[in-house]
Amino acid sequence: DYSHIQGTRWNKNVLTYSIGRYTRDLPHSTVESLLESAFNVWARASGLTFVRLHTNSADIRVEFVTNAHGDFYPFDGPRGTLAHAFGPGLGAGGDTHFDDDEFWTAGGGTGFNLFVVAAHEFGHALGLKHSRNPESVMYPTYKMSRPSNLLSREDVASISALYRPLRAA
Ligand SMILES: CC(C)C[C@H](CS(C)(=N)=N)C(=O)N[C@H]1Cc2cn(c3ccccc23)CCCCCCNC1=O
Ligand SMILES: [Zn+2]
């Protein structure tokens, strides 16, 4: 069956990611640690492993871009849509773009918290859809006041339903 080509989930336990263009709002090391933390949130709940590559051949290619940037989903300047990610699959599958017309932060204050937004986007990159539960990290609108553990019980259940069986296989 061809579900592995454009399926609802990745059919492997180890996923690679790369970071292309960075934002100038934060040091590179801060961007890298925030993205790693966002991947770890899902790794703990799914049993998946994420490995960072420095090549363009990674499964999940992460970039900070503005306006039209080479896919059919141009960004919209400040505010509005903050980021987007493609679902599992070859090529653009999993790729995650952050709108660099936003101001990205590592903490509170003004701007958007990169860790919180990345956790939402990587949920999409792993195959999750939006949740109607405002407590879920997959809620369609940004909400900074997230508990430190970030994932709601519903998020853990969703990602486990999608990937735990793979681990058992
Ligand atoms: C959940 C995110 C991390 C990712 C999603 C995008 S996606 C594809 N990954 N689901 C996102 O950006 N949602 C918008 C949704 C949104 C809220 N408004 C908008 C005004 C215009 C356009 C969009 C929005 C009202 C004004 C607030 C604008 C800033 C915050 N924007 C959002 O919360
Ligand atoms: Zn979303």
Image: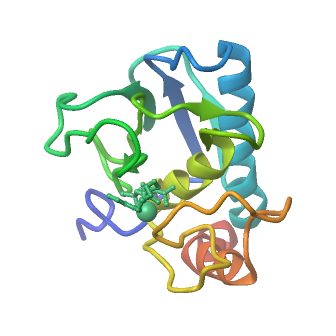
The extreme right residue here reads 148
- Figure check: 68 above or below 11: above
- Figure check: 9 above or below 36: below
The foreground one among 11 and 61 is: 61
> Taking the image as four quarters, which one is ligand 2 found in?
bottom left
What quarter of the picture does the C terminus occupy? bottom right
Q: Can residue 58 be seen in this view?
A: no
Residue 12 located left or right of residue 115: left
The foreground one among 88 and 164 is: 88
Q: Look at 59% across and 20% down and name the residue there.
A: 25
Q: Look at 51% across and 20% down and name the residue there.
A: 23
Residue 125, how many percent across, how many down? 45, 54
Q: Look at 60% across and 39% down and name the residue there.
A: 111
Residue 86, how many percent across, how many down? 34, 51
Q: Is residue 74 visible?
A: yes
Q: In which quarter of the image is residue 157?
A: bottom right
Residue 162 located left or right of residue 77: right
Residue 125 located left or right of residue 53: left
Residue 110, how many percent across, how many down? 65, 39
The foreground one among 133 and 18 is: 133
Q: Look at 38% across and 40% down and name the residue there.
A: 95
What quarter of the picture does the N terminus occupy? bottom left
Q: Quadrant of residue 155?
A: bottom right
The extreme left residue here reads 72
Residue 13, how many percent across, how many down? 60, 53
Residue 15 located left or right of residue 105: left
